[in-house]
Image: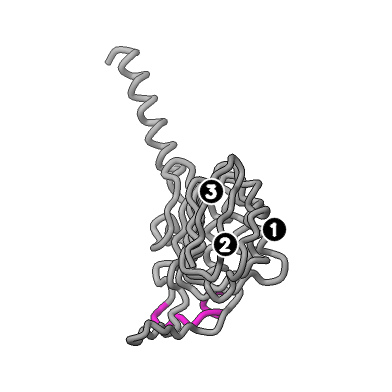
């Protein structure tokens, strides 16, 4: 076999070994996911087995867990889908009245590890806010977060201030937080979000319109 062919083969083997080595999730992030599962199990009304694929076993690869998406090269968690974790009863009658479970509060420190996170979906959970002051601190660490879905929760206007720390944010869904989002929207709290492209404020008790950085205007449906 000629030397160029041998050299090419060696490069292929090195590349394959690198990909094989990197595809596993980061251990620190795996442990954070397990801590998050333990917190959710304790704090929510989840009826069925909660996140059954999230196992604390050496052979359990967290990049293959349900609701988790990793970067195939680096192994970092880049997408986390935790929609409808709280399975409290939602009852819809003829007049569309709803029953929601008692609000609960998320431990923001459980998100501090995921510095490469691009998408976070916490919708349909009845979350009322963050435990202590951890929400603002944790969100400020999510420097790569582009999409945040908080629809169908109970966040109030005071929570909005913590969102200004997510500088990369492009898509923000705050629809159906009608129990907490009332009156005029605090537009100044979002003025720092220069990259914001899509903002959903529908089905709340807000009024008027807001203008964010770059004179982007969003109409509030109420």
Give yes or no for residue 45 being in the magenta stretch.
yes
**Residue 69 in picture, x, y percent from top left:** 42, 53
- Of tags 3 and 2, which is closer to the observer? 3
Q: Which residues are magenta?
A: 39-49
Report the front residue among 74 and 4. 74
Label 3 crowd bin: few (<14), some (14–19), many (20+), radius 10 Å: few
- Residue 97 is tagged as none
**Residue 21 in picture, x, y percent from top left:** 45, 43
Give the position of the N terminus as an image quadrant.
top left
- What residue is drawn where x is 42% and y is 61%? 60
Examine the rendering and report whether any part of residue 176 can be seen.
yes
Instruction: Identify the mark nearer the N-term, 3 or 1.
Output: 1
Q: Quadrant of residue 144?
A: top right
- Residue 32 is tagged as 2
- What residue is drawn where x is 35% and y is 87%? 93
Q: CA distance from mark 3 to mark 2?
A: 38 Å
Marks 3,1: beta carbons within 8 A: no
Instruction: Identify the mark nearer the N-term, 3 or 2.
Output: 2
Instruction: Identify the mark nearer the N-term, 2 or 1.
Output: 2
- What residue is drawn where x is 53% and y is 63%? 33
Report the front residue among 135 and 203. 203
Label 1 crowd bin: few (<14), some (14–19), many (20+), radius 10 Å: some
Residue under label 3, please give it. Answer: 217
Q: On the picture, is 121 further left or further right than 182? A: left
**Residue 7 in picture, x, y percent from top left:** 37, 18
Residue under label 1, please give it. Answer: 137
């Amino acid at each position: 076999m000629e030397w160029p062919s041998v050299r090419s083969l060696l490069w292929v083997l090195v590349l394959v070994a690198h990909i094989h080595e990197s595809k596993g999730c980061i251990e620190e992030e795996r442990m954070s996911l397990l801590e998050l599962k333990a917190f959710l199990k304790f704090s929510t009304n989840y009826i069925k087995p909660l996140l059954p694929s999230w196992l604390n076993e050496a052979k359990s690869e967290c990049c293959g867990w349900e609701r988790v998406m990793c970067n195939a090269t680096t192994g970092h968690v880049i997408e986390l889908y935790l929609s409808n974790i709280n399975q409290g009863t939602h009852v819809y009658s003829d007049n569309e009245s709803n029953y929601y479970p008692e609000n609960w509060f998320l431990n923001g420190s459980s998100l501090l590890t995921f510095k490469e996170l691009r998408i976070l979906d916490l919708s349909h959970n009845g979350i009322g806010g963050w435990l202590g002051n951890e929400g603002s601190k944790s969100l400020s660490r999510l420097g790569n977060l582009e999409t945040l879905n908080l629809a169908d929760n109970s966040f109030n206007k005071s929570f909005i201030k913590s969102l200004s720390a997510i500088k990369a944010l492009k898509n923000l869904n705050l629809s159906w937080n009608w129990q907490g989002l009332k009156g005029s929207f605090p537009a100044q709290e979002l003025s720092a979000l220069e990259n914001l492209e899509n903002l959903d404020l529908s089905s709340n008790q807000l009024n008027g319109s807001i203008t964010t950085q770059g004179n982007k205007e969003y109409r509030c449906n109420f």
